[in-house]
């Protein structure tokens, strides 16, 4: 093979890898589920997910000010 053909193939492989990495990072956190809190003293389940993983969190609601709002923060650790 010619040297310029090897260089083109190498750049193509690098470009495909970068596109795959960018897609994985961007689509990791594209949907957030945070249902509305109806009453106090309940357990609410909030979640965020993308193409690659699902993160969900069980939150015990005990503050009156949370009624009528979403049950969890958008950024959830773990």
Image: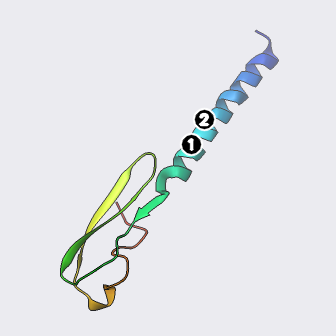
- Side of 12 where 60 appears, left or right: left
Farthest front residue in view = 38
Q: Quadrant of the N terminus?
A: top right
Farthest top residue in view = 1
- Side of 61 where 11 appears, left or right: right
Tell me how the rendering is colored: rainbow
Residue carrying label 1: 21
Q: Would you say the residues marked 1 and 2 are in contact, meaning their CB atoms lie under 8 Å apart?
A: yes
Residue carrying label 2: 17
x then y, percent, for residue 5: 78, 17
Q: Quadrant of the C terminus?
A: bottom left
On residue 51, the disc is none
Q: Nearer the viewer, residue 38 or 77?
A: 38
x then y, percent, for residue 45: 28, 66
The residue drawn where x is 59% and y is 46% is 22
The residue drawn where x is 48% and y is 57% is 29
The Cα–Cα distance between marks 1 and 2, rounded to whole angstroms, is 6 Å
Q: Secondary structure at mark 1?
A: helix
x then y, percent, for residue 28: 48, 52
Picture quarter containing residue 9?
A: top right
Picture quarter containing residue 77?
A: bottom left
The residue drawn where x is 58% and y is 39% is 20
Please, is residue 65 above or below residue 15 in the view? Answer: below
Please, is residue 45 above or below residue 71 in the view? Answer: above
The residue drawn where x is 64% and y is 33% is 16
Please, is residue 9 above or below residue 37 in the view? Answer: above
Mark 2 Cα shell of 10 Å, populated few (<14), some (14-19), many (≥20): few
Farthest bottom residue in view = 64
- Side of 76 where 3 appears, left or right: right
């Amino acid at each position: 093979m010619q040297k310029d053909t090897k260089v083109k193939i190498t750049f193509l492989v690098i470009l495909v890898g970068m596109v795959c990495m960018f897609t994985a990072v961007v689509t990791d956190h594209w949907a957030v589920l945070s249902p509305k809190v109806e009453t106090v003293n309940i357990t609410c389940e909030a979640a965020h997910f993308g193409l690659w993983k699902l993160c969900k969190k069980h939150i015990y609601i005990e503050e009156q000010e949370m009624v009528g709002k979403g049950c969890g923060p958008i950024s959830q650790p773990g």
